[in-house]
Image (tube, coloured by chain):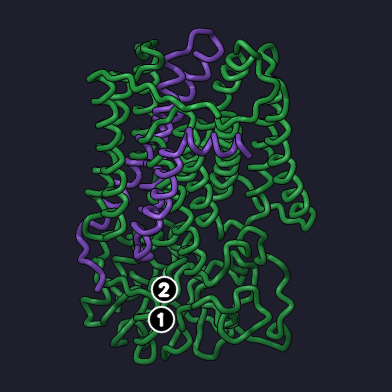
Chain colours: A purple, B green
Amino acid sequence: MEDVLKFFMENKDLIFIIILSVFLGIEVISHVPAVLHTPLMSGANAIHGVVIIGAIIVMGHAKDTLPMVLGFIAVILGTLNVVGGFVVTDRMLEMFKKKKPNK
Amino acid sequence: MDTIQKVIQFSSEISILEISYIVASVLFILGLKKLSHPDTARSGNLWAAAGMIAAILFTILFHKIDGENIGNIPWILSALAIGTVVGWYAARKVKMTAMPQMVSLFNGMGGACAALISLMEFPKMQIKLAALPIPATNMLNGEAIAILLGLMIGGVSFAGSMIAFAKLDGRIGDIKHPILRIINLSFLALLLISIGFIMTLAPNPDSNLVIYLFAAAALIYGVTFVMPIGGADMPVVISLLNSFTGVAAAMGGFLYSNQAMLTGGILVGSSGTILTILMCKAMNRSLINVIIGAFGGKAASAASSGEKSVKEITLSDASILLSYSQKVFIVPGYGLAVAQAQHLCHELDTLLASKGVEVKYAIHPVAGRMPGHMNVLLAEADVPYEKLVEMDDANQEMQNTDVVIVIGANDVVNPAAEDDPGSPIYGMPIIKASEAKNVIVMKRSMATGYAAIENNLFYHPKNRMLFGDAKATLQKLIAEIKAL
């Protein structure tokens, strides 16, 4: 029990951010029209590419061959997620440009 | 109890880095917000992208662990360059119809990235724990939870996305067997138990076998998780896996106490979950129902007996019927996307419009393989947005519509959803094509749609079939109307 409380205290800021972000995420998109489901999903897909920062951090401190190789692959995969995600979303939204808001 | 002391290492570089993370988080939030409104969606995407670039750039420049800067910069930059070129090229070149697969593929990359991070951090943690003045006897700590959950969720997301990609691309079919359900549940339980088990182990700096086994199990679960889910439900699955990857990214944020990763990941995790539920709602089904899979079971419903006749319509009859109508609704479906017939469809509607016919499109929220699929497809063919009518509005206009042309759609116009409680799609809102005066269904054959159920609309007295590939048929129909 003490361990749990200690863990909570050590990470209280992060836990706070997590809880607030959960509510924020729900709130931000709760009134999206069905037309935008796909672009929104694709945009969110690009945003979770932020995992690339983790890959850069490991890669940046890797010393041995195996972590170097894995880190290199991880950075490439993360970049694919970010770049591909944003470009695909932009292409989808490009097609909506002429439209007026629906009702 | 030990007092917890937080040593704040102050330097202007760290401050700049943290400020850039705050800016990135704000841009992600505003980006998502703008993405959910049609007018601002495109700029929202760019805002989020700007936040991402800032976060990446400042991490490379200013990130430090124990005072040590990021090294291996040439390698990092070349990996970034490779990813950018390949990602950009793939995203630019892909056909509009293959968009869903592409999103799934990119999602899988993110999941794999998260899993690899965990795979590299686990050995580091083992070494660190074993080298403590009093070597740890177990791995019961927050870091281990973040690593293991990141690996599991990332791995499932990667493997699942690859299967979803292959299904949407038509490379593999569904494998449906009741036993898969049991296998899946036991696999999930096994994974969760393994997390607990691994954490009770003493750290062993010499062997990382346990983490590789765990990674392999997560990958297998990802495959068996998506395998039984029908191809028509892939959008929901992709959205779900998308939110999984968000959570996996957040685990990385937890691991590195990195706020940008944390907010970005959790935002996607929670908004992705809500989006998944919204998509399910649009189909009037529950998420559990999609995952366990009620579709594809045999529809032993009342409507299967009795002699039913299908009437065909000739091209010339169809062209005359259309040319002399007042109001026509086109109901597009996946078949239109497969046949790449969206441009011909637009040609047909302008041709009819020039003859004074009012032509509109009735868009079912789940027509196609992704919600909004039809909107994107028709927008590509320059069909004006005002002509796309949402299902509820279209249904109100049905009664004074002369002809409804169903092109490559099936389940979204199946009246069984309304009148047959035994049908697996019972309760799903549909486009009420049979309320119009005439219905023409363009279809390659009498085969069933993705839900694998008969469609009584085809036998409806008002309906006539126009068999053939959507593209070829539309071409002939346009030629016929022009010749009138």
The x and y percentages for residue B421 are: 65, 83
The crowding category of the residue bearing disc 2, from other C-alpha atoms within 10 Å (few below 14, some 14 to 19, many at least 20), is many
Q: Which residue is mark 1?
A: B404
In this rendered view, identify the residue nearer to me: B410 or A78.
Answer: A78
Q: Quadrant of residue A66?
A: top right
| Secondary structure under the numbered disc 2 in the rendered image | strand
Q: In percent of the image, x 76 and y 56: which residue is there?
A: B177
For the residues tagged 1 and 2, is the chain the same?
A: yes
Q: Is residue A74 visible?
A: yes
* Residue B100 left/right relative to A95: right
Q: Please give the name of the residue rendered at 31% of the width and 40% of the height, measured from the top-left corner.
A: B25
Residue furthest toward the top? A64
- In the image, which disc is placed on residue B331? 2
Residue at screen point 78% across, 58% down:
B178
What SS does tag 1 mark? strand
**Which quadrant of the figure contains the N terminus of chain B?**
top right
Whether B300 is drawn above or below B187: the answer is below
Q: Is residue B96 left or right of residue A3?
A: left
Q: Quadrant of the C terminus of chain B?
A: bottom left
Residue B142 sits in quarter: top right
Q: Judge whether B307 appears above or below B54 on screen.
A: below
Q: Position of residue B138 (x, y in %)?
A: 69, 24
User: How far is disc 1 from disc 2 in space, using C-alphas?
Assistant: 7 Å
Q: Which residue is nearer to you in this view: B365 or B258?
A: B258
Q: Amino acid at mark 2?
A: Val
